[in-house]
Each structure stands twice: as C-alpha cells, then as structure tokens.
Image (cartoon, rainbow, N blue to C red):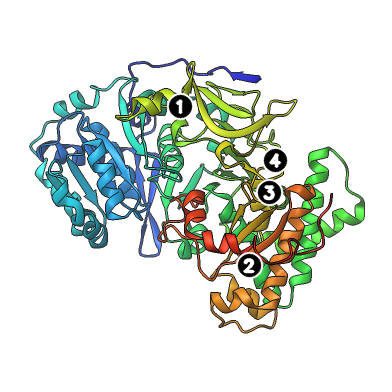
Amino acid sequence: MKQIDAPAVVAPRPDANVTDLLVDRLAESPDLVLFSVPRAGGWDPVTTREFYDQVVALAKGLVAAGIEPGEKIGLVCKTRYEWTLIDFAVWFAGAILVPVYETNSPSQIHWSLSDSGATGMIVETPEHFSRFDEVHPELPAVRNVWQIDLGDLDKLVAQGRDVSDAEIERRRRLAGGDDIATLIYTSGSTGKPKGCVLTHANFVETAANSAIGLRLVLQDERGASTLLFITLAHVFARFIAVLCVHAGVRVGHQPDTKQLLPSLGSFKPTFLLAVPRVFEKVYNSSEQKAEAAGKGRIFRAAAAVAVEHSRARAAGEALPLSNRLKFALFDKLVYRKLRDALGGNVRYAVSGSAPLGAHLGHFFHSLGIEILEGYGLTESTAPATVNRPGESKIGTVGPPLPGVSVRVMDDGEVEIKGVDVFKEYWNNPDATAAAFDDGWFKTGDIGAFDDDGFLTITGRKKEIIVTAAGKNVAPAALEDPIRSNPLIGQVVVVGDQKPFIAALVTLDPEMLPVWLNNNREDAGMSLAEAAENPAVRAEVQRAVDAANQRVSRAESIRKFVILATELTEASGHLTPKLSIKRNIILRDFAPEIESMYQGSPVTEGISIRE
C-alpha cells in the first residue's frame, strides 16, 4: 500500500454552509461581474450584488410557496444561468436540491424523486414536464411543480415579496457543515442509482482548498472566466460553479454544443472544464477540415511538431533550431487558429471522467493550453486529485488536492479520505458500509502512484476482464486510444472468460460523412452501410492495430464488430457523462459478441506484438 496525504491549507469552518460563500463574495466584491448571461448575440453582466438579490428574491418565493427547511426539490434543467440561481436560492430557503439529468427517463425521474422524498419539482421545458408528468400521479409527496420556460421563476419572485429578509437570513443559517447540502444520484452505470449525500462542508472545505491549489487557474490579469457547457446536474460542473462564486470567477453557460465555438469566440474564457471527448472532437474536426481543404499533410505535420515540442519541454530538453523554426511557422499557420477558435484567451483546461491520452495532452500544451487532468467521483464532490499549473504530468491525474488523502491498496484499488468525501448513501446503510474501509472510501478504480506522488488511473476494478487463459486485461488501456480516432464513436472491449480479447465498435455519426468525403467515399451512406464499407473497416483496423501496439499479444484485440447503430444516453448505453454502461451493452449485444467467438479466425490485423 502507498498513501499520500495532502494537508488542508485552509482552516475548517464547521458552522459554515454554501450560502456563506456567496455572502463572503458579496462583502468582498459586490460590483464584480460574477456571471454573463447570453442576450441577443452578446453577454449581459450580472454582478455579485445582482446575483445575491436575485437569489434572495427567489428564495422568498420558495418560502411563500410553502417550502420548509430540509425539504427536497428536484430540478431538471440544461446548463444555464438559472440552474445556479435556483441552486443558491434553494440553499438560502433552507432546502435541499436533488438534480435530475435532463435526459433521464420518466422511470429514472420517478426513482430520484421518490427515493429522496422530494416535495417540489422544477422543470425547464414542456418536454421535461411531459416526462415528469407521466410519473407525477405516483409521486403524491410532490405538491409543487414549476416550469422555467413558463415564467414560473418570475411568478415565484412576485409571490415572495412579503417574505422578510430576516426570515431568509434565519433559514440560510440553519444548516451547519455536517448537514446535507444536496442529494446527487449516481449515473447508474451499474445497477440502480444510489443517492450520494454531500454535505455543506464537502462543498465549503473542498472549494476553499481547491481555490488555493488551483489559484493560477482561478486568477488571471484579464479576470478569470469560464464557459460551462457540461451538465450542471453532474457534480463536476456544479462544484466548479460553486468554486467560481467563492473565487470570484466570471461564469457563462452554453448547453448547445453546436453553438459552443461561436460562444467561446464571444465569451473568451480563460479556462475550460471539459471531458476528454471534447478535446478529441476539437482535434479530429480540425484535422478533417484541414483534410477537406487539401491541407491535411500540413495539419498532421503541425501536430507532430507540437507533440515533439511539448515532450521536449516536459523532459527539459532543447529543440534543434530547425524544429524551433518549424514550430514558429506552424504557430502562425495552425496553432493560432485553434487558439482563436477557443476564444483566444484559454490558458488552462480541467479535464476529468476519462484519460485524455498523451498525444492530445502534448498537442494542446504546445498551443499554450495546459490541460490539467484530474480525478474524482460524485462521492468525492468531484475533485480528489488534479494536476497543477506548471507542475503537471501528462498521462496522470495529478497529486491529491489539499485536504485530501489518497492511498493505493495492494490490489491496486484507490481509496480516498478527506474534506471532499461524501457522508453516506441515502436510505442505503448496507451500500454505505460496503463503500468504506475504516473511514476510507473505496472508489472501485485501479491506479498507481509514481515516485513524485502523481496518480494514474488504469481502469475499474469490476471491469477487469479475465480471459479463459487467466490473463487480466484493463479495457480502458485499449478503448481510450481507439476512441481518439475521428471515425470512431465508442469502443467496448470484451473477452471475459473467452479465449481472446475482442471489441464492439461504433462510428461517430458527425465525423463519418466528413471522413467519407475526405477519403473519396459516398458521404451519404448510412451507419449500417459504413459498417460494411472496406475503407471504413480498414480505418477501424488501423486504430485497433495502433492500440494493440501498446499491450502484449494476450491483451490485444483479435477481432472486432462494427455495430450499425450508436451507443447513446437515449439508447440507455451511456451515462450522462458519456461513460459506457458496460453491463447493459454486454447484455444488449450478446449475439454480436458471441458471433466473434464462433466459426471465424481469431486474428484480424498484423500489428500485434508478443
């Protein structure tokens, strides 16, 4: 076992709750622009004072509507300013928010609201309301329902005008650090979602220590800012929203990824919060656009030089003059355009949920964008470890944050203890007991520390595949590099108790027509047609071969099947953070899996090493 402790750098505030973060920000900088709200092609500023006043006014409306301290309110809403406004208003009213993913089915909505005992529900759109309304008759405790798009927030504000400031002040002070701040249901990649009880101390202490640990990200001479586009229902984005209030960072929102680049161009953030798939999309779409314009060779040469440049810097080596000249040339031709596409001011990006890959990490680093990979779970209020500006190691998720201890057990499992670790699973003492080892949260992830205390995550303990020959295989080591190919959407490695490793592959429907056109194939072919296309199969084989070069022959993929469909959240095969639901996929595609082990050769491709 190896254990690393990162002592807290901020004195604990056991009586504080999340509302104190906003009250403290108001006292320090009432006129600071804390949010920018999209309006008519531009961004309207919202100062700390304006946000605070809006929070209090909405909290008064909730009180007037009969919401009592300690009651739970569900919220289904895309990433927008009103999400955080509601979040703080609920806290100021003394209540507890239960986030619901906007893609959740009626049955999933029913589970979150019934298991939590919610008495109120806020939905954003008529479509959200329709899904909730299907199960509303089975939720008698939910007595209040509001719809944002119908103007119900304004109606609540009007309803609460007679509620006194003193009553809101009394309510917001009721909760202490050990009291529940929110109930977040796990995304359910295996089994029924469990409700994670996160306390006010989890948010307050983790934010306070993270603000010190990530101070270079949260401070910028132009004013630090970020554009949130991943869902706020997930603790990763929600924690960052709270952290930004604490640190005085300007926040904007853009839930529509098709509008992301225009929004980045106008908002001009200094740092981003994203999952690796976003960076893969930026890189792959840029490469394919260059290919379509007849500049594919230039882009690939520029990428190679960028990676070489970053690797040399990381190793403390000096590049030859010829390489420095190439880098300067490509900076004008390629890198600057990519920086401008992200708004021109991005210096850092915090990435989580899956490994990024060394190639992309080095590529963006040479663009002047340091991607700080981190690691955490819902149960750790998101961050547990993260790389620091100027002290990052590409391919790792960094050292523990201040206030967090991490240990790697003899079997490789990562365990966490500290200010960020949740209190319990709601109404589930058995699951809570099973999740802890003498006060340490058992993450279920496999990892290792290097000599400098930087953690690397290699896979999920429950997802380790054991072949018929007894070889242990971590699927992520193969899936992540294959998925970085622009043509590929998802990869699911299989082979438990089978004679060899195989894989299910899906194609990326956005990139497929671009790739087909660039490779002189029919850009209009369907997914089913593309799955059988020789050129497409050859490209997938190249991606598989490249991944196989990273592992031994016993761990390598011998066969694959390209599915004529997508794996999506809507199909039930991905979680809201786009992680694969492995058990469900194995069940739904059992015939396709079995077909790879019957009546055909066991090897496809040639680049497999012993």
Q: Nearer the viewer, residue 276 or 461?
A: 461
Q: Which dot marks residue 61?
A: none
Check disc 3 and report its element: helix, strand or loop.
loop
Q: Residue 449: where, in percent of width, then height?
A: 69, 28
Give the left or right position of residue 95, taking residue 231 as reference. Answer: left
Q: Residue 486: where, in percent of width, then height?
A: 64, 65
Can residue 564 be seen by looking at this rendering? Answer: yes
Q: Name the residue tied to disc 3.
A: 357
Residue at the far left: name it. Answer: 162
Q: Residue at x 20, y 57 (%)?
A: 134
Check disc 2 and report its element: helix, strand or loop.
loop
Q: Earlier in the sequence, mark 4 or mark 2?
A: 4
Check disc 4 and report its element: helix, strand or loop.
loop
Q: Name the residue tied to disc 4.
A: 470
Residue at the far front: name it. Answer: 599
Q: Earlier in the sequence, mark 2 or mark 1?
A: 1
Q: Name the residue tied to disc 2.
A: 487
Q: Name the residue tied to disc 1.
A: 435
Q: Residue at x 47, y 30 (%)?
A: 380
Q: Residue at x 39, y 17 (%)?
A: 13
Q: Amino acid at mark 3?
A: Gly
